[in-house]
Amino acid sequence: MADYPETPMTDTHNPAIADTRRWVETAVIGLNLCPFARAPYVRSQVHFAVTEATDDEGIAEALLAEIHQLQALPAEERETTLLILTEGLADFDAFNDFLGLADNLLEHLELDGTFQIASFHPDYRFADTPDDAIDNYTNRSPLPILHILREDSVAEAAEAMDDPDAIYRANIERLRALGHDGWRRLWPSNASPDRR
C-alpha cells in the first residue's frame, strides 16, 4: 500500500470522505489520472469537506464557505478542497447545470481568476460520449464532487508541461487499456464509483 497520510479521526466516521479518499488514492493517484495530485495529497494539503444540502442554494452556500476558507489559508497549509455532495445533485444533468451557477458565483465574487471549479460525478459523461464509454471514468467519482482549485497552481502545473492536453489523451488510453473489468477489479465489493 502506498505511503499516504493518516486519515484524520473525523474521516473514519464519515463514509463519504473514506470513499472519496479511496478513489483519490486508487484512481486519481493510483492510475496517475492527475500527475499533480500526489504531492499535495501526501503533504496533507487536500481538504475533504461534506455537505448534505439538497438544493442549489444550500450547495452554493457550502461551496461559498469552502471557497472563503481556502482563500483564507496559504497554499502550503491547504492547496485544494474537495466538496463532496452526499445528498444533492445525484442527477448528472442537474449537476452539470449547477456548474454554471458555480462559475457565476466565482465571477460575482471576482474570484474567477483566483479559483476554478473542477467536477466529478458517479455518472459523469463527456459531450457526445456514450454513457458506458470507459473514457468517462476519468471523471467518475463515488459521489458528486466540486473540486476547488487555485488558478496559480493550475497555471504553474500547465507551464511545467510541454503539452498539458497530453494528460487527457494519456488518461483515455490508460482507461481504454484497463477496460471496464479492470476498473471494477480496482475496488472492493460495492466500493466502485461505477454504480451500475
Image (spheres, rainbow, N blue to C red):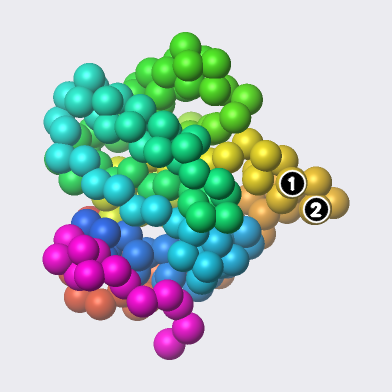
For the residue labelled by badge 1, is the local secondary structure a helix, a strand or a loop?
Answer: helix
- Quadrant of the frame with the N terminus: bottom left
Spatial separation of the CA atoms under disc 2 and disc 1: 6 Å
Q: Is residue 127 above or below residue 2?
A: above
Q: As rendered, which of 178 and 62 lies closer to the eye?
A: 62
The structure residue drawn at horizontal position 48% and vertical position 83%, both measured from the top left corner, is 3
- Is residue 100 something one can see in this rendering? no
Q: Is residue 139 above or below residue 96?
A: below
Q: Main secondary structure of the magenta part?
A: loop
Q: Are marks 2 and 1 in contact (CB under 8 Å)?
A: yes
Q: Amino acid at mark 1?
A: Glu
The quadrant of the image that shows the C terminus is bottom left
Kind of residue at badge 2: Ala
* Residue 42 on the magenta segment: no
In depth, the one of 131 and 145 nearer the eye is 145
The dot on residue 59 is none
Q: Position of residue 83 (x, y in %)?
A: 33, 43
- The x, y position of residue 195, in whole percent, is 23, 57
Span colored in magenta: 1-15
Q: Is residue 111 above or below residue 7?
A: above
Task: Say above or below: 67 vs 172.
Answer: above
**Residue at the (80%, 53%) spot, across then down:** 160
Dot 2 corresponds to which residue?
160
Q: Residue furthest right?
A: 162
* Residue at image location 54% in from the left, 16% down from the top: 110
Q: Which residue is mark 1?
A: 156
